[in-house]
């Protein structure tokens, strides 16, 4: 079936989940109260801000400030409300024992996840739409154009959809409404505040270097109209925003889809697909940024370090996500690989824990090869991270093989391993230091236990940005840790294989 035919069928046969959820939301007093309270909050903040800047000497400057206040508060409220409602969208079906009926219907898990996500997004999109009359107060002061308003509105809606997708992903992964709301609301509020602070700092610097009229977190609203159309424009104003929206959004959708699959289906497949598609796109964007903008050696090493940290974090998260799922896809699961993804079937058939290990190791190796191949410290870190991920996956596979029904036991052993190696080995090193009566720099001259600590390796990798600060002891410890973890990985995977569970 062609893409045009699929779009036509989707328009003719709307997802019934969307209609059902929207009707239920509009009739829910909690939703109505949330929208009313959100609008009152946005209106109050805008009115107080307008009153405080009404006496300014330059009204257009006040208009720019009010523009950022309005969209900043609107975005914060939209994301907070959207993620909260998204976090309850699927788990309520699970608590009411109606989720199985939905997923086993003709809709299937994929359409159920899409319908839930679309319904949550449309529900929260009412907030900026109903707040549009407040833009009249913003435009009274001047300083902003219709183009600025359109760009800011599009950004608010797009990243509001990402927040809704995060809520739906959490809702598909937990079993109670209380747990879903507890896991969702605080991290989203904190991430929004941190993201706003980072955007403010970046916006001030970017606006100063490019002479933009709007500074602060919404600097990009003016950048689209003030900057010339060149490689830098394409990179930072087109490709980078698309990556920032699509990468987490598709990941959250993949997690939601995986959470709706039953035990007979391959629940690791959506996340594997996301990893196989998102990683090349990320590396291509990073390579374009390094080639199209002036980058020193330290900048390229810093980029390699950032990609390494992201790859290790994602690989570790996949190890915990895959614990308890089918480690090797069955023949029925293999038949589910259809469409354009069938060419990637060999990668999808790799046992789940080993896939996470290989994903992290290969991504780190590619990052080092592309951006910091001349740094011995980064090459040592590549071997260290690959071996560490292999040992962690072997430990979780071995624990899962001992208890087929207990994914929680494997995850618990993984958490204990991360805590002991990340924190406990520092305590051992400090005791060794105190017992020896010397006070060397543990980061530059680590003791033997720190060769196995992920937190020490993280700090040592930061030193790789400044190669002259990397000591011989640091390099020796990185290679020693890599060797020990490689040996542990081989032993643990061999034991798990003998039990027939990898």
Image (cartoon, rainbow, N blue to C red):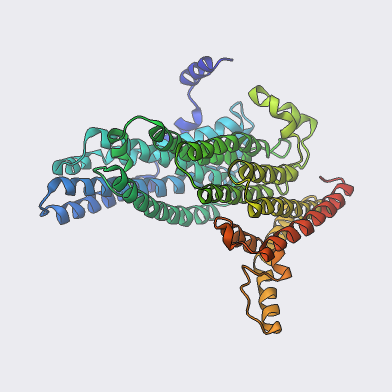
Q: Position of residue 91 (x, y in %)?
A: 55, 46
- Residue 108 percent across, percent down from the top left: 61, 30
On screen, residue 451 above or below 34: below
Question: Compared with residue 8, is residue 471 higher up or lower down, i.e. above or below?
Answer: below
Query: How many numbered circles does the render carry?
Result: 0
- Is residue 209 found left or right of 345 in the rendered image? left
The image quadrant where one finds the N terminus is: top right
Q: Residue furthest right?
A: 498
Report which quarter residue 471 is drawn in: bottom right
Q: Nearer the viewer, residue 182 or 316?
A: 316
Image quarter of residue 408: bottom right
In the rendered structure, the answer to whether residue 142 lies left or right of residue 363 reads left
Q: Please tell me which residue is depicted at 81% across the width and 57% down the height of the picture.
A: 488
Q: Is residue 24 visible?
A: no
User: Residue furthest toward the front?
Assistant: 468
Q: Residue at x 50, y 32 (%)?
A: 17
Q: Quadrant of the C terminus?
A: top right
> Which x, y percent locates residue 355?
72, 42
* Camera sees residue 103: yes
Question: Front-most of 430 and 377?
Answer: 377
Query: Which residue occupies the foreground of this view, 152 or 90?
Result: 152
Where residue 314 appears, x then y in whole percent? 61, 48
Residue sitting at x 18%, y 48%: 61
Classify 35 as above or below 454. Answer: above
């Amino acid at each position: 079936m062609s893409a045009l035919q699929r779009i036509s069928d989707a328009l003719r046969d709307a997802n019934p989940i969307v209609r059902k959820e929207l009707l239920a939301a509009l009739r829910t007093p909690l939703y109505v109260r949330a929208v009313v309270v959100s609008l009152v909050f946005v209106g109050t903040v805008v009115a107080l801000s307008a009153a405080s800047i009404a006496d300014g000497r330059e009204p257009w400057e006040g208009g720019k400030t009010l523009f950022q206040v309005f969209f900043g508060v609107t975005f914060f409220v939209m994301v907070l409300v959207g993620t909260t409602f998204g976090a309850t969208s699927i788990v309520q079906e699970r608590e009411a024992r109606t989720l199985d009926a939905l997923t086993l219907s003709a809709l299937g898990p994929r359409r159920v996840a899409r319908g839930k996500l679309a319904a949550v997004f449309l529900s929260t999109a009412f907030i900026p739409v109903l707040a549009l009359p407040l833009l009249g107060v913003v435009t009274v002061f001047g300083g902003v154009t219709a183009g600025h308003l359109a760009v800011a509105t599009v950004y608010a809606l797009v990243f509001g959809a990402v927040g809704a997708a995060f809520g739906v992903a959490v809702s598909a992964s937990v079993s109670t409404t209380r747990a879903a709301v507890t896991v969702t609301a605080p991290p989203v509020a904190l991430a929004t505040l941190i993201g706003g602070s980072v955007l403010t700092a970046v916006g001030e610097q970017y606006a100063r270097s490019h002479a933009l009229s709007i500074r602060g977190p919404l600097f990009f609203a003016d950048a689209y109209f003030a900057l010339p159309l060149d490689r830098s424009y394409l990179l930072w104003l087109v490709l980078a925003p698309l990556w920032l929206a699509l990468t987490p959004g598709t990941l959250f959708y993949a997690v939601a889809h995986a959470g709706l699959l039953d035990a007979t289906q391959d629940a690791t497949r959506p996340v594997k697909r996301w990893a196989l598609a998102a990683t090349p796109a990320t590396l291509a964007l990073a390579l374009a940024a390094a080639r199209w903008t002036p980058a020193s050696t330290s900048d390229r090493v810093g980029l390699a370090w950032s990609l390494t940290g992201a790859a290790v974090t994602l690989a570790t998260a996949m190890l915990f996500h895959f614990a308890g799922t089918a480690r090797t896809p069955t023949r029925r699961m293999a038949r589910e690989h259809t469409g354009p993804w069938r060419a990637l079937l060999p990668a999808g058939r790799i046992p789940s824990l080993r896939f996470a290990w290989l994903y992290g190791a290969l991504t780190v190796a590619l990052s080092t090869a592309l951006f910091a191949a001349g740094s011995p410290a980064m090459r040592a870190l590549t071997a260290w991270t690959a071996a560490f991920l292999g040992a962690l996956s072997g430990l979780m596979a071995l624990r899962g093989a001992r208890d087929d029904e207990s994914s929680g036991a494997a995850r618990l052993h993984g958490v204990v391993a991360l805590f002991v190696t990340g924190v406990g080995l520092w305590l051992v090193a400090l005791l060794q230091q105190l017992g020896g009566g010397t006070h060397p720099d543990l980061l530059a001259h680590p003791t033997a236990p720190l060769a196995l600590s992920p937190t020490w390796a993280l700090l040592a990798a930061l030193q790789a940005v400044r190669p002259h600060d990397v000591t011989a002891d640091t390099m020796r410890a990185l290679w020693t840790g890599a060797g020990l973890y490689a040996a542990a990985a081989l032993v643990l995977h061999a034991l798990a294989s003998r039990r027939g569970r990898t």
